[in-house]
Amino acid sequence: MPIRKKNIVGLFVLMALMVGVKKIFEYAAPPSTPKNCDFAYPTVFDATKLTNIAIDVSEKFAWEQRGGVMNDASCLNKTSVYGVIDVRSVDDVKNALKFARDNHISVTAGGAHHSMGGQSFSRGGLVLDMKGLRQIAVDEEAMTVHVESGATWADVQKILDAKGLSVKAMQSINIFTVGGTLSVNAHGIAHDPGSVASTVRQMHVMLANGEVVVASPTENADLFHHVLGGYGLFGVILDADLDVVKNEMYDWETTYVDYKDFPEYFASNIDGNDTFGLAYARLSISPSSYLTETAVHVFQRTLFSEEMPPLVTDSHTALERFVINFSKTGRFGKRVRWALEKHFVPSSGTCISRNNAMSQKEVCLVSRNQKMFDSMGYLRNRLKDTDILQEYFVVPSKMTEFVDGLRSIVQKNNANLLNVTIRIVPKDSVTALPYAKEDMLAFVLYFNQKLNVEESSVVEKTTIDMIDLTASLGGTFYLPYQLYYSPEQLRTSYPEVDDFFAAKRRYDSEGVFSNAFYEKYGGE
């Protein structure tokens, strides 16, 4: 029986709709299984060298995993390990360290494993899964929160929000553990004070010999300065006392400026202005305004006579996931995403409604806790790719040169740049290995790549070029990412690093603590 032309057209339309629906689902749906990270770059993973548990002992801790492999959020660092310990108490840490010393095994403490260069494990090493240590206690009189290192920032936020309090500083995503944040000396959108390290009153740290010591700016101060941003090389952070502040309501305003005008806009409107509780900016990735148009988001303190709204989870995760995944596909996707962010954010999903604040005149009201309560669930997807973070620091006067260089490097290498966020980072006078050696702007870059050698090499080349660019402008790069940089590049940005490594060996003379970062750059 002949097939009529209109039937053929109808069949093609139906097929197109089916493909479209499938693609929309693929872009919008959360993952149903863990991402397949059976890939390693730059070295090929050798499955014949998997570590086996060979020592028969009566352990005083629970194994979460014996032998096997670990990876991190990059999906590029598949590594065989001795095993993973399920830490539930301080004694678990102490016993695991004794086991490691007795059997000459290196140890790394880990949390969410979002450092992307193997900083949370080492080949053949023992990994302490710290997520079981998550007790939290608030001291409202002292305005501090006592947090065990395995607690996530989301855990902390929920408890503080119920008491009308907020963290003073944290990472921009709340899925990370507090111990991990302190180990990498992270920062977020709270431009004052900047890094989380500056908000730490004291910590309890277990040294390699099992001794627990208090570290603070006045007690064991040298250890304090090295543990913060120490990548777990000096001891295991057990808990910390952190500064908290009052939760408050902000009027969220967004202004668009040219990237060349941002340093002056920042100096005139944001720097030193105590009315702003949070501030950050974002560069356009749309082809029509590529890395030129800059959205400046400021959150101005405002009087609020109503009851502070409780924290709510994001109700638009599927849509946000679709939009960001669509932006990975090319120029049109990036144009659509920037247009949506420009015209529909802030949206009803973040701002409280007029009905909830009839006496307020502000366009968008959002609490401090709500704005900082971001799990970025939309980044979890079903695609066969990975998203790579990088971060670079330059002084405001060098921003134009930096962005022009970034644009040139990304276009030359054909890297898939998805996002550029600008944060304000004051000078770091707390840590032994500071990335902000003076008041600087942080440029957080977000790349997408497929899990193959070709696209991995593109990101590697882009990273090396970006580090050279930043160094030429007197800037630095953030260390918790891929280890693509050379020892010379490391020492150019961090001339203190050899003193840092010497201090590590002084505190850990037996070499108990290690990770991929130290093994590549810190060995004698």
Image (cartoon, rainbow, N blue to C red):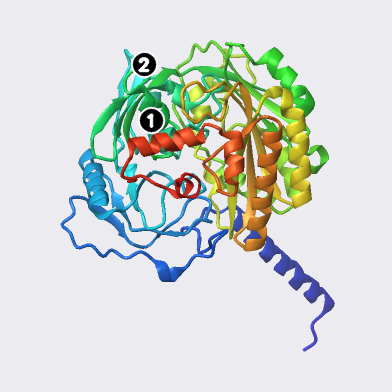
Q: Residue furthest front?
A: 524
Amino acid carrying label 1: it is Val
Q: Position of residue 446 (x, y in %)?
A: 63, 43
Q: Which residue is mark 1?
A: 156
Residue 18, visible in the rendered structure: yes
Distance from label 1 to label 2 (Cα)?
14 Å
Identify the residue at image location x=67%, y=61%. 454
Task: Examine the image and state in which quarter residue 235 appears.
Answer: top left
- On residue 35, the disc is none
Height in image: 17 above or below 162?
below
Q: Is residue 49 above or below residue 326?
A: below
- Amino acid, disc 2: Met
Element under disc 1:
helix
Q: Position of residue 405 (x, y in %)?
A: 76, 38
Disc 2: which residue: 143
Query: Can you tell which quarter of the image residue 340 is in?
Result: top right
94 and 367: which is toward the camera: 94
Residue drawn at (74%, 36%) of the image: 284
The x and y percentages for residue 402 are: 73, 33
Q: Secondary structure at mark 2?
A: loop
Question: Does label 1 or label 2 sit earlier along the sequence?
Answer: 2
Q: Quadrant of the N terminus?
A: bottom right
Residue at 37% across, 62% down: 68
